[in-house]
Amino acid sequence: EDLLQKSKAETTSYYDDLPIGLAVLDVNLRYIHINNRLAAINGIPAADYIGKTIQEIVPTLAEQAQKLVADIIKTGEPVEDIEFQGETAVQPGVQKTWREGWYPLKDDDGQIIGFSVIVQEITGL
């Protein structure tokens, strides 16, 4: 059991310290997990995201995310290399651009139960 706990802690550390943003959301766009990199974009501690919706955390991006999720639910397919633009709480009034990939998470019956999201800031690239 100690080995399992150590392995889980290492995996969490890798996930949290990656140089790209990662999140897991449920079908209602509530955050289930988020790494430190993505949380830092909005200047909100990762723990404060859990259970909140994109609308609550990043209202300027919520409509775009909802449309994207509707397409994924309809097709069952991921959407990769999509660009999002908007402001963050850390830098209001400053437009940022992110490249994102949204991947459906499915249960054993193939029903979409959430989404895994990868985010990379590409402002100015």
Image (cartoon, rainbow, N blue to C red):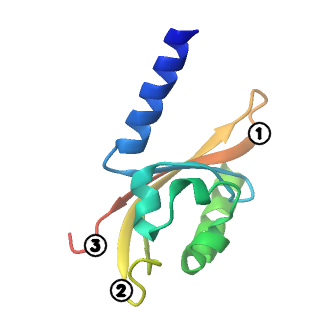
Find numbered disc 2 in the image and state the secondary structure of the residue it sits on: loop
Specify which label sits upstream in the sequence, 1 or 3.
1
Residue type at tag 1: Gln
Residue type at tag 3: Thr
Image quadrant holding the C terminus, namely bottom left
Find numbered disc 3 in the image and state the secondary structure of the residue it sits on: loop
Task: Identify which residue, 40 or 66, lies in the foreground.
Answer: 40
Task: Identify which residue, 43 or 23, lies in the foreground.
Answer: 43
Residue plotted at (63% across, 76% down)? 63
Please name the residue that numbered disc 3 is placed on: 123
Q: How far apart are marks 1 and 3 (CA)?
A: 35 Å
Please name the residue that numbered disc 1 is placed on: 111
Please name the residue that numbered disc 2 is placed on: 94
Task: Identify which residue, 86 or 17, lies in the foreground.
Answer: 17
Specify which label sits upstream in the sequence, 2 or 1.
2
Expressed as whole percent of the image width and height from the top left, the position of residue 66 reads 66, 68
Image quadrant holding the N terminus, namely top right
Expressed as whole percent of the image width and height from the top left, the position of residue 55 reads 66, 73
Q: In the shown orientation, is residue 22 left or right of residue 56?
A: left
Find numbered disc 1 in the image and state the secondary structure of the residue it sits on: loop
Residue plotted at (38% across, 34% down)? 14
Expressed as whole percent of the image width and height from the top left, the position of residue 32 reads 65, 48
Q: Is residue 96 visible?
A: yes
Specify which label sits upstream in the sequence, 2 or 3.
2
